[in-house]
Image (spheres, rainbow, N blue to C red):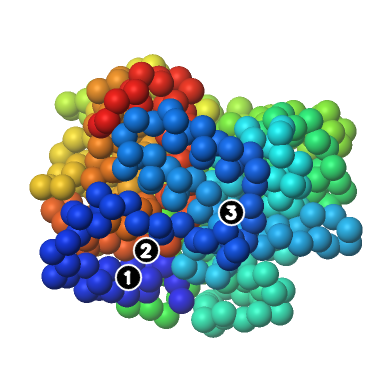
Amino acid sequence: MNRRQFIQQSAGASAGLLAGQSLWAAQVMAFPVVRTVAAKRNFTSSAVEQTIERMHKTIKDPELAWLFENCFPNTLDTTVQVGTTNGQPDTFVITGDIDAMWLRDSTAQVWPYLPLTKQDQPLRQLIAGVIRRQSLCIRRDPYANAFYADATKEGEWKKDVTDMKPGLHERKWELDSLCYAIRLGYHYWKTTGDTSPFDADWLQAMQLVLKTCREQQRKTNRGPYHFSRNTAWSTDTVPGDGYGNPTRPVGLINSTFRPSDDATIFPFYVPSNWFAVVSLRQLATMVEQLRPTPALSTDCRALADEVERALKQYAVYTHPKYGKMYALEVDGYGNHLLQDDANVPNLLGLPYLGAMPASDPVYRNTRRFVLSPDNPYFFKGKAAEGVGSPHTLVNNIWTMSLTMRALTSTDDQEILSQLRLLKTTHAGTGFMHESFNQDDPAKFTRKWFAWANTLFGELVLKVANERPHLLSKPL
């Protein structure tokens, strides 16, 4: 089952589950035990448990503390499968209610635990295992976005018109997938100093990353990747005989799909190209210091520079109201798609990924647009306001957008307002959902979405470290 089917099913199921429950408010105030019981957790980290205990003393709002206790460990509690392969750690991470591992989601799911690896050797080994598994996945197919643990398994999308292989859940080319694998490896190395995951297999995977990015600049031809699916969902298949709408070879990298797993309209997806600039430079540094391969590191830096120049030339749109701002997608012919999508990388999250500071004037203009009614996917209702996605229903706000707005904000009141919205829109479940109706949080999609949960935990920890006064009293 894919994400869109889960949207349909979980939206109806969630509404039905909560319909008629007049004691909903009372249940929230009772803070029921909803976290997986200790005996059934997939992995327990002493550092994570200590962090939860510490945060219970730091967070003065009882409901927010309860949410943190549920959400922060959710990836470890429910989605990791820890083992070894050839004597080395090997960690498979499902996304939640789909039993497949996305390169993007798996990085984001374990990301908030990185600072704790210094004091928790088993946790460090778990994340090293994720890096090794991601390298294996990339070597299996750098164009795929999601994989099965069993390399022989064939899923429901085995008939997609692409070079589909056993072991792939989906084969949607999303530039950010490869960037996320670099992001995790680079910051793991910088945090722990451990170089063991970065062996010859990792180097081969990284060579494929560069090769794939170069192919998708499409300077001389359309490259080897194409994709089509027999589906009623227009965004689950690709125009142009599976290659996407035309792009002019200006130096940007084509991404046939967005981080939402929806097909792009203009295949130069701007946030992922910015992400690639950051990631390619990180990869160049890693190669230079860990696996000296001058041609690879030099080409990574050259490609990052080329993409950055092209972004500044082709991705900036002069809006009559907001001034110079970034488009979500462009094609090199002068066309610009003006909207944002809650899935990260997106325009709102550019500083979070290290692409630019939050004070950058073009980003500030872009942010004002994204968080306004001029963004067609900014929704405001009785329950909340925030960014949604074409991936879900119109008028559905993604919890990730609320979290990312706070993570990229420098304003106390804006951060507080997002924390309040996150606290009041979990529909009594104690967990973050993928999205919820702007007027009724009980109508939500995906009750088990680990990325949204751990991202929320990351936000609360960031606030506690940088702005503890915001947690010093009830919200």
**Where does label 1 land, which residue?**
10
Asked if labels 2 and 1 touch by Cβ distance under 8 angstroms, the answer is yes
**Where does label 2 land, which residue?**
446
Q: Residues within 10 Å of mark 2 (few under 14, many from 20)?
A: many
Taking depth in this image into account, of 52 and 238 the one nearest to the observer is: 52
**Residue 120 as seen in the image, left or right of residue 202:** left
**Where does label 3 land, which residue?**
76
Three-letter amino acid code at disc 1? Ser
Task: Kindly state the secondary structure of the residue where label 2 is placed.
Answer: loop
Is residue 356 shown above or below 137?
above
Instruction: Give the farthest residue toward the left.
Output: 382
- Locate residue 464: give its quadrant: top left
Tell me the distance, in whole angstroms, between the alpha carbons under discs 1 and 3.
22 Å
Residue 187 point in image, percent of width and height: 66, 34
Work out which quarter of the rendered image holds the C terminus and state it.
top left
Residue 345 point in image, percent of width and height: 46, 42
